[in-house]
Image (cartoon, helix red, strand yellow):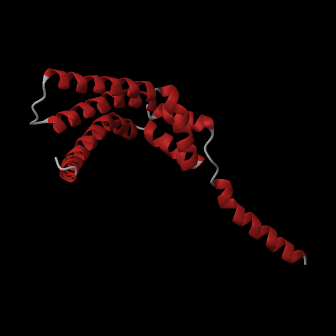
Amino acid sequence: MTRFIRILTLALLLGAAPLAAAQPPSQAQIDRLLEVMRARETLDAVIPQVQASQQQMVAQMTAGQELDAEERSKINRVIEITNARLAETLTWETMEPIYHDIYARTFTGEDVDAMIEFYASPAGQKTLEKMPQLMQNTMQAMQQLVMPVLQQLEQEIAAELGG
């Protein structure tokens, strides 16, 4: 019986080992990761890119249309309001707890330590330097991909409505 208990105890300990290793990251680990990833600076850089992307999308949507001054003014007001809302919404105070929650639910403490090590390295810092350009290029590529679909949708809606 004693041998059975030892084997059972050993099996339980071995089974629990992966669980112990997969501990969620601590608040301090996530804080350090966000610091080395320059998350706050990245967020600050994203807002103007999103706003510029919105301007480009509106320009593409209205390309070839004869808009008078009043129509252009209305569009510009909507863009200004949207830009202000984005700037109010995408603050560090709003996003930091969201980042913490996402990283805590997604990664283990070990994962976060590995990311800290990478992003603190020269290669990681170079990656971070290139990230805004990567995001801008991605957004432009997505716009080019999605714009024909949106234009087709606009035409189909107009056709359905008899316009």
Q: Nearer the viewer, residue 137 or 80?
A: 80
Residue 58 placed where, x, y %? 22, 34
**At 49% across and 32% down in the image, what residue appears?**
95
Left-right relation of 15 to 150? right
Residue 107 seen from this side: no
**At 18% across and 50% down in the image, what residue appears?**
162
Q: Nearer the viewer, residue 105 or 59?
A: 59
Q: Can you tell which quarter of the image residue 60 is in?
A: top left
Residue 136 placed where, x, y %? 27, 37
Left-right relation of 150 to 20? left
Residue 161 seen from this side: yes
**At 31% across and 35% down in the image, what residue appears?**
132
The N terminus sits in image quarter: bottom right
Q: Residue furthest front?
A: 162
Tell me if residue 100 comes above or below residue 4 in the rendering.
Answer: above
Residue 154 placed where, x, y %? 21, 47
* Total marks placed: 0
Q: Residue furthest right?
A: 1
Tell me if residue 85 comes above or below residue 7 in the rendering.
Answer: above
Residue 68 placed where, x, y %? 12, 24
**At 20% across and 53% down in the image, what residue appears?**
156
Q: Nearer the viewer, residue 81 or 142?
A: 81
Left-right relation of 6 to 65? right
